[in-house]
Amino acid sequence: MILVNEQHVRIVVPVHPRKKLKPGLIRVIMAEAGLTREKYFELLERDC
């Protein structure tokens, strides 16, 4: 999946059925998106 953040930066997120993303990959995606840990969990809670 290709997402675009507010600064128009493309972020590639692998999506595979029945597989979870590993914590290291989540940290890399967060860094690319410019998200802090707090903002990530805030967005995660809001969207669930």
Image (spheres, grey):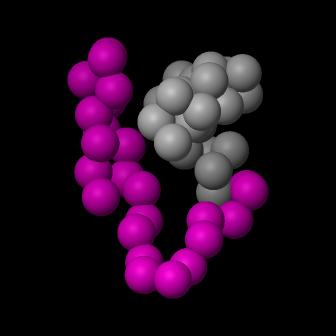
At a point 25% along the width and 23% down the height, the residue shown is: 8
Which image quarter holds the N terminus? bottom left
Residue 40 position by quadrant: top right
Classified by dominant secondary structure, the portion drawn in magenta counts as: loop
**Percent of width and height locating residue 44:** 57, 36
Q: Is residue 42 above or below residue 21?
A: above
Residue displayed at 28% across by 34% down: 4
Q: Nearer the viewer, residue 31 or 22?
A: 22
The residue drawn where x is 74% and y is 57% is 23
Q: Position of residue 11 (x, y in %)?
A: 37, 43
| Displayed quadrant of residue 20 | bottom right
Instruction: Report the residue that reaches farthest toward the front.
Output: 48
Span shown in magenta: 1-24
Residue shown at 68% from the left, 44% from the top: 27
How many dots with numbers?
0
Say above or below: 18 vs 47.
Answer: below
Magenta region includes residue 20: yes
Residue 32 appears in the rendering: no
Q: Residue 15 vs residue 35: left or right? A: left
User: Can residue 38 be seen in the rendering of this structure?
Assistant: yes
Q: Residue 17: x percent and y percent?
A: 42, 81
Front in this rendered view, residue 46 or 14? 46
Which residue occupies the extreme bottom position in the image? 18
Magenta highlight on residue 45: no
